[in-house]
Image: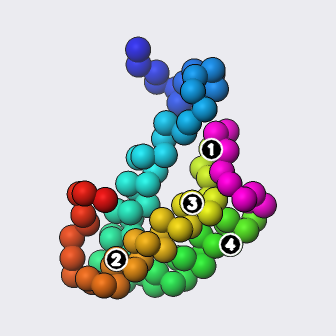
């Protein structure tokens, strides 16, 4: 079944198992976004500071199923791992096996 309206699937997510079905694509977008930002010259430390601020402002120790665009500690930790990877190999390509 296809849904044109993203909000139409929200009840199915809530009724189903307690997991974030968008977590995988969100992780991939963050990961590839860091690579793109590096290539065009963005300061990853400043971007990381923004992630940290968003995490702090969320006021949560974890993200929840109903967060529409969570910026919790898990996402910040993943960002920091990606930055370390980029610094270790600045000209490298994104890994497919992560």
4 or 2: tag closer to the N-terminus: 4
Q: CA distance from mark 4 to mark 2?
A: 22 Å
**Quarter occupied by the C terminus:** bottom left
Extreme residue toward the top, this view = 1
1 or 3: tag closer to the N-terminus: 1
**Is 66 within the magenta?**
yes
User: Residue at the location (64% across, 73% down)?
Assistant: 52
Residue placed under numbered mark 3 in the picture: 74
Along the viewing direction, whichever of 16 and 45 lies nearer the viewer:
16
Q: Position of residue 47 (x, y in %)?
A: 53, 76
Q: Nearer the viewer, mark 4 or mark 2?
A: 2
Residue placed under numbered mark 4 in the picture: 53
Q: CA distance from mark 3 to mark 4?
A: 14 Å
**1 and 3 marks in contact (CB < 8 Å):** no
Residue placed under numbered mark 2 in the picture: 85
Q: What residue span does the magenta drawing correspond to?
A: 58-67
Label 3: element kind: helix
Which disc is residue 68 wearing?
1
Q: Is residue 85 above or below residue 68?
A: below
Q: Nearer the viewer, mark 1 or mark 3?
A: 3
Along the viewing direction, whichever of 85 and 46 lies nearer the viewer:
85
């Amino acid at each position: 079944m296809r849904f044109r309206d993203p909000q139409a699937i929200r009840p199915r997510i809530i009724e189903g198992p307690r997991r974030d079905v968008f977590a995988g694509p969100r992780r991939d977008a963050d990961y590839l976004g860091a690579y793109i930002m590096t290539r065009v010259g963005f300061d990853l430390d400043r971007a990381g500071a923004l992630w940290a601020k968003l995490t702090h402002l969320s006021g949560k120790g974890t993200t929840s199923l109903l967060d529409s665009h969570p910026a919790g500690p898990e996402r910040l930790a993943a960002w920091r791992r990606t930055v370390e990877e980029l610094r270790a190999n600045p000209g490298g390509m994104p890994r497919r096996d992560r």
